Image (spheres, rainbow, N blue to C red):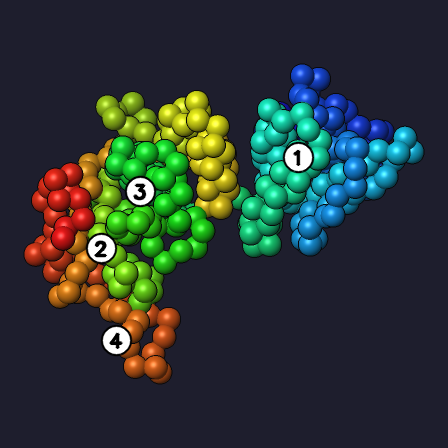
Amino acid sequence: MTPFESCWESLEPGKGYKRIDESHPLDFYIGVDSSGLRVLLLVLDNELSVPVQSQAIQVLCRQRQDGRWALMFCLSRPELGSLFSHLCEDLVESCRQISDKIIAGNLILSRFDRWQRLLRSGSTGLLDESTQKGLLGELLFLQRFALPVYGRIAALEGWVGPLNAEQDFRYTDAIFEIKTIGPDAHKIRISSARQLDDADRPLQLVVVMLDQAGRTEAGAFCLSGLVGELRHELCLDIQASSLFADLLISAGYFDREEYGLRFFRFRHFRHFAVREGFPRIIESRLIPAIGNVRYELDLEACLPYEVQDPEKEPYGV
């Protein structure tokens, strides 16, 4: 149970609101309305235009008797209580360093928009096992390759997988598609005919090899632990830290106890240069009647394209 959930549990419906944090520069309150629904409230000096309503959360901006305005986020679906708690914590923390209420109000609404995909999907916020492993692979590549090569901001701006791009990382000089597999896997799944398309710049398929591990094994890590490491690495750079937080939201990730239960050990990356002759399906070569292509790729067939020293020959060209 998060601190917000504990606080909501202690409040009686329709009995007013409680200030969240006296040290916060903004006037945030939480409460439970007379119907028993949870509410996050921010007191502002001006009216704001609220976003398009979701089925899960109603957003209101109402004028108070003292002439100020109350920006309210009201949870309409109680089964999403845990997700709502994390959303509210993120909104509050995202503007902890901002005292200007106009800037803060617009920032919060902009940040709320990033949560809308999760809310529209009706997700309870827990990524399935396959998606967790995929995110692990992308985070490992970000930490061990992209950040050292491109630097914080460029590395994060190039991480476009959470934004539903065809590939996971896109930079001015190269594209990287990440696939995460276990030690006994020999095939990977390609989700579209565009995923291995290198039409505009060099493309690498990067296979992340992971073993399952016990909690106490040397080198073992879990998803929440890896996220924590990256947050620590980026914490002194406000822009990078904020961008990373936004990308995690877009990826559907927020802190949950379940992400600290399964442990893995990183084995290595395998880099494959995707170029002419590489075994793949490309959309431009399909007849018009064929679409929505998904297929499995045998890694044994890719051996002639494996890059043996990606640091010296990072793009395999």
Q: Are marks 1 and 3 in contact (CB under 8 Å)?
A: no
* Badge number at residue 137: 3
Q: CA distance from mark 1 to mark 4?
A: 49 Å
- Residue holding disc 1: 103
Q: What amino acid type is highlighted by mark number 1?
A: Ile
- Single out the mark in the foreground, 1 or 3: 1
Residue found 70% across the figure and 53% down from its top? 53
* Badge number at residue 19: none
Camera-nearest residue between 305 and 46: 46
**Mark 2 crowd level (few <14, some 14–19, many ≥20, 10 Å Cα):** some
Q: Please indicate, yes or no, whether residue 96 appears anywhere in the rendered image.
A: yes
Disc 4 or 3, which lies upstream in sequence? Answer: 3
Q: What amino acid type is highlighted by mark number 2?
A: Pro
Disc 2 or 3, which lies upstream in sequence? Answer: 3
Left or right, 150 with reference to 117: left
Quick one: SS at disc 4?
helix
Q: CA distance from mark 2 to mark 1?
A: 40 Å
Quick one: SS at disc 3?
helix
- Single out the mark in the foreground, 1 or 4: 1
Quick one: SS at disc 1?
helix
Q: Please indicate, yes or no, whether residue 179 appears anywhere in the rendered image.
A: no
Residue found 21% across the figure and 61% down from its top? 297
- Residue holding disc 2: 202
